[in-house]
Image (cartoon, rainbow, N blue to C red):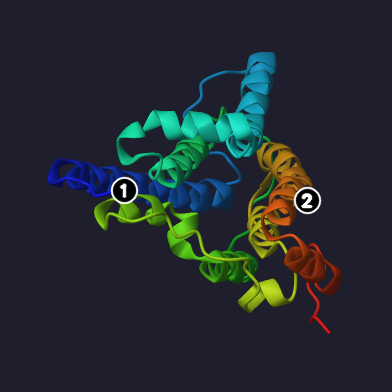
Amino acid sequence: MNAGPVLKVFAIAYGLAAHATFALAVGSMAYALSTGMQCGFGLLHGALAFAANAALALQFPLLHSWLLSTHGRSVLRRIAPWGGGRLATTTYAWIGSLQLLAAFWLWSPTGIVWRDPSGVALLAHAIVFACAWAFLVKALSDAGLALQTGAVGWTAVVQSREVRYGGLPERGLFRFCRQPIYLGFALVLLTAPCWTLDWLALCAVWTLYCVVGPRLKERRWLRIYGDRFERYRRAVPYMIPRRAP
């Protein structure tokens, strides 16, 4: 369990690189959505652009979900084996960030814009968009930012201990719905101020993932927490918030 100085330095560098990529991915997502996905560097057109954009939209939910499966978790442990598997959570966050960067940077814009607000309308849209981001950040914080950003992995290596995943999240926004992170992610997508064909295509795929994807997470929670999660599930709604009795 004890990590030598070289492994600790590696873990710190690994974690900082993952966090930097995460920050860049979040910034890219905010900017790309604010432009209606019109800022991508993809140069494809017509059917090729449609196929490439569809692949970019699908790769995030498919790989992101698969990496949490039994086989996916074994792959994560093998990518950075020097930490004894403890870097898997950091690797998962890093891969997710790279997936987001791929979606936003490699997107081939169609140029079909339906609504690009300005003036007071833009200000109103921007406020709603910012509120959606604030909701998402709050949800991530309530679930544990260290876990969501992968910090629990590399810090465990540096401190020569096991990874502390935290328990079943039930505080904060988790008191009102079981999946506030996915709800916040969907709200960020849906409140983007610029409406385009590209935005609608990405929004349709990723919003569907936000609704369906958490079912897989809840299966894991049921397996890990058993009756505790079952009681929580009966008391708290899935996606639409309401105060628990």
Residue drawn at (68%, 22%), measured in percent from left and top? 50
Label 1 sits on a secondary structure element that is helix
* Image quadrant where one finds the C terminus: bottom right
Residue at image mark 2: 211
Q: Where is residue 235 in the image (x, y as percent from the top left)?
A: 83, 74
Q: Nearer the viewer, residue 58 or 191?
A: 58
| Distance CA(mark 2)–CA(mark 1) | 30 Å
Q: Which residue lies furthest to the bottom in this view?
A: 245
Left-right relation of 27 to 223:
left
Q: Can residue 163 be seen in this view?
A: yes
Residue drawn at (54%, 64%), measured in percent from left and top? 140
Q: Where is residue 193 in the image (x, y as percent from the top left)?
A: 63, 57
Q: Nearer the viewer, residue 222 or 182?
A: 222
Left-right relation of 210 to 103:
right
* Residue 133 figure quarter: bottom right
Q: Which residue lies furthest to the left in this view?
A: 5
Q: Nearer the viewer, residue 100 or 194?
A: 100
Q: Position of residue 222 (x, y in %)?
A: 74, 55
Residue drawn at (63%, 71%), measured in percent from left and top? 124
Say which mark, if any, is on residue 15: 1
User: In the rendered structure, which amino acid carries the disc numbered 2?
Assistant: Val
Q: Nearer the viewer, residue 109 or 157?
A: 157
Mark 2 or 1, nearer chain start: 1
Numbered disc in front, either 2 or 1: 1
The answer to whether the residues at label 2 and label 1 have Cβ atoms under 8 Å apart is no
User: In the rendered structure, which amino acid carries the disc numbered 1?
Assistant: Gly
Q: Residues within 10 Å of mark 1 (few under 14, many from 20)?
A: many
Residue drawn at (52%, 31%), measured in percent from left and top? 74
Q: Residue furthest front?
A: 1
